[in-house]
Amino acid sequence: MATKKRSSRKSGRRKYSKGASKSVESAMRRRKRGTLRSGKSGKGGKVKSRRQAIAIGLSEAREKGAKVPARKGRSRKGAKRRRSGSKS
C-alpha cells in the first residue's frame, strides 16, 4: 500500500485570499496596459517591473482588508522608534 506524501503546509489553508489574488491580477493587467503608476495616489512614474506590479497589487489588497501576509522587515505602526538626537 502506497503511503500518502505529506506537505509541510496545512491542507485547506490559503496564504493569500481570493480578494488579494484579484487585486494582484488587476495590477498586472494595468501594468500591461501601461496605466499602473507607482507612488502615493499614482503620482509617480509608470511601473514596468513585474515584481513592482505584484507588490502594488498586494499593497492595495492589504488596504482593502484582504488576507495577505505581513510585509517582510516591517514592524507594526506605532512601534517604538529609535530617537535621534544627542545624549547628555
Image: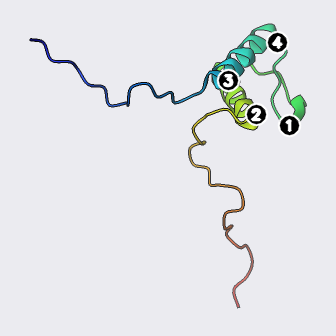
Sequence-wise, the earlier of marks 3 and 1 is 3
Q: Residue at 44% of width from left, 25% of height from top?
A: 12
Left or right, 17 with respect to 10, comes to right
Q: CA distance from mark 3 to mark 1?
A: 21 Å
Which residue was labeled with disc 1?
40
Mark 3: give few (<14), some (14-19) or many (20+) Cα within 10 Å: some
Which tag, 2 or 4, sits closer to the chain's start?
A: 4
Front tag of 4 and 3: 3
The mark nearer the N terminus, 3 or 2, is 3
Tell me the quadrant of the picture where the C terminus can be found: bottom right
The quadrant the N terminus occupies is top left
| Residue placed furthest toward the top | 33
Q: Disc 3 marks which amino acid?
A: Gly
Indicate the amino acid at tag 1: Lys
Q: Quadrant of residue 83?
A: bottom right
Residue 64 is tagged as 2
User: How far apart are the two marked residues, 3 and 2, measured between alpha carbons?
Assistant: 9 Å
Query: Residue at the location (74% across, 19% down)?
Result: 27
Most extreme residue toward the left, as rendered? 1
Disc 4 element: loop
Kind of element beneath mark 2:
helix
> Which residue has dot 4 on it?
34
Q: CA distance from mark 4 to mark 3?
A: 23 Å
Residue under numbered circle 3:
19
First in sequence, mark 4 or 1: give its number.
4
Q: Residue at the location (72% across, 62% down)?
A: 78
What x and y, as percent, mark residue 32? 75, 9
* Residue 65 drawn above or below residue 54: below
